[in-house]
Amino acid sequence: MRRLFRPPPASFWALLVLLNEPLTEALLAEKFYDGESGFPCLLPHPERYILAQGVEAVRSRKTRSLCRRATTCREGLEVECGCAESIPRKWDIITPATSPSGLLSECGTRPLMGLGTKPRIVGGHDAQPGAWPWQVSLQVYRFGVGYHHVCGGSLINNNTVVTAAHCIRQWTHPDFWRVVIGLHHLLKYQTHTIKCLVQAIMIHSDFKKETYENDIAMIKLQKSVIFNDYIQPICIPDSSVFITKETSCYIAGWGSLKEKGRSTYILQEAEVDLIPLYICNRYDWYAGEVSWNMMCAGSAGGHVDSCQGDSGGPLMCYFPNKMKYYLLGITSYGVGCGRPKFPGVYP
């Protein structure tokens, strides 16, 4: 029986700290505006207010209630509706179209898989097209070769990808990279597949290449993507997310199918167990090597694991009470691939 435990507070939560840093706020500035931006969010209309052109929703910072394009903001709310110019700092403004319908996409959902549908595998298999719509391929350019897959990553909004810092520390200039989203086969692009150039890269300031602590990086895309059935963001956990025995976790990637083996062209998926740190650090396991701000996932007997080429990809968990998938970790490192007592380690 899987133990009931809460994720280490600084495993993936390091990303949450990162997301609150001013630099990251600047990276996300195209999506969120405050009252000082001068961006008109709401326009007066007889007996109500309507959203300005290009604005898809506004959220009250006090009540967190949303006014979407499909509804209206009316006077008499607990928090006034008005233009950002006249009511500074009271609304978060979300722009522009983030789905074909013009409404905001809901994170952590898989439109093609159905609500709560579990992967059809246990030990690792081909994923179905669209199974993990936030999974991306990070590809680096090499002269004479072109772009090739290096690592995975996770789309967390319409212009930001989270990956592992060790994936990009050798090529930190954005011009080396592109991000491919909505991809199933590395060599077969579909009409819904999007190739994005990179505007900015930010590596966690406390990343340690010797121990892989804080192995986290963020990538800002040059252009925002439009969500569809094959492209969706994954949710980032908050303090209300607890792991229970009903929580199921998965990994995915285009990495090697076995240790020292060849990589695969088709996206693979596998279900993994979250392994408590006190077990993972036993003397015949990692012998205390895994720090408190990491977590282990795989299986005690091996066989189910991430491998070379999977780095940067998501450790994603489904929470039935929320009916969503959350990003709980980033594929970072391990001893070999699929070895007993050496599961994958995730910041």
Image: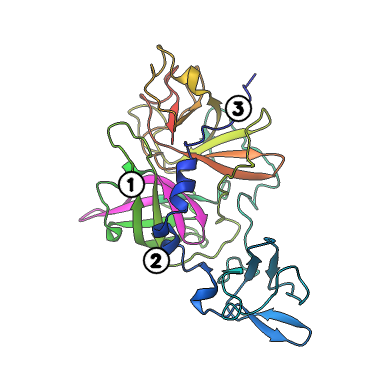
Which residue type carries mark 2? Gln
**Which numbered disc, 1 or 3, marks the residue that appears first in the sequence?**
3
Q: Which residue is denoted by mark 3 in the rendering?
A: 5
Task: Tell me if I can see residue 110 in this picture.
Answer: yes
Of labels 2 and 3, earlier in sequence is 3
Check disc 1 and give the amino acid type.
Ser
Assign the C terminus to one quadrant of the image.
top left
Residue 10 among magenta residues: no
Q: CA distance from mark 2 to mark 3?
A: 39 Å
Residue 33: image location, x then y, percent: 52, 70
Give residue 179's quadrant in the image: bottom left
Residue matched to label 2: 222
Horizontal and vertical percent for residue 280?
Answer: 46, 20
Task: Give whichever of 157, 147 is nearer the camera.
Answer: 157
Residue 226, above or below 271: below
Magenta highlight on residue 149 = yes
Q: Secondary structure at mark 2?
A: loop
Q: Look at 42% across and 63% down and name the residue there.
A: 26
Taking the image as drawn, is residue 103 in sight?
A: no
Mark 1, residue position: 205
Residue 47, compared with residue 201, is above or below; it is below
Disc 3 marks a residue whose amino acid type is Phe
Residue numbers of the magenta segment:
138-163
Q: Name the residue located 68 percent from the left edge and 70 percent from the top edge.
A: 68
CB-based contact (under 8 Å), mark 1 and mark 2? no
